[in-house]
Image (cartoon, helix red, strand yellow):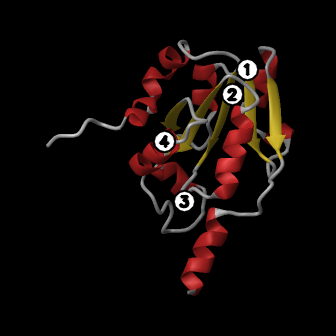
Amino acid sequence: MDYPCPAHEQKICPPEQLAAAVAGLPRPLVFTNGCFDILHRGHTTYLAQAAALGSSLVVALNSDASVQRLGKGADRPVNRLSDRLAVMAALGCVSLVTWFEEDTPLAPILACHPDILVKGGDWPVDKIVGAREVRTWGGSVHSIPFLHQTSTTALLDKIRRL
């Protein structure tokens, strides 16, 4: 028996189609980005908080090559992009998920033209890529403090010690 592709995978949007896809989303539009390699409670809490700031949440993931250039380790990402996209798309608070090959998410930010730009609490607002641009068109920028002190790097370190 053939089963249909899961509906949540329709939320995965190639970068070249991003501008058109976000045009159909309710505003205000919230944008965030990251590796989201091994999804954990810190990620899901942060994403739910980000989504609550607007009506739609777009998440842009670093491509596998982009993650490797961040220097997180030779074995990162653990999960390849296609798997990270599918997991992210399965979250109810996420409206659309895309990716970027570059070292920063500036291209998808410009394509989305978000009303609200969000990063985690380890990013000071003045260091968030795209902050200047989003403020230029009247948007706001937020750094959401961490509620749970978890990280993929710490989780992998714990696994390796077992």
Image coordinates for residue 19, horizontal then vertical, percent: 52, 17
**Marks 3,2: beta carbons within 8 A:** no
Looking at the rendering, which quadrant does residue 91 occupy? top right
Q: CA distance from mark 3 to mark 4?
A: 14 Å
Residue at the image point whose x is 72% and y is 25% from the top = 54
Location of the N terminus (image quadrant): top left
Residue under the point 69% across and 40% down: 48
Are the residues at dot 1 and dot 3 in contact (C-beta closer than 8 Å)?
no
Q: Amino acid at mark 1?
A: Asp
Mark 4: amino acid: Ala
**Residues tagged 2 and 1 counted as in contact (Cβ below 8 A):** yes
Between disc 1 and disc 3, whose residue precedes?
A: 3
Q: What is the distance, in whole Å, between disc 1 and disc 4 at their CAs?
A: 23 Å
**For residue 59, what is the image quadrant?**
top right
Mark 2 to mark 1: distance in Å?
Answer: 6 Å
Return the x and y of residue 115 as percentages of the image width and height. Answer: 73, 20
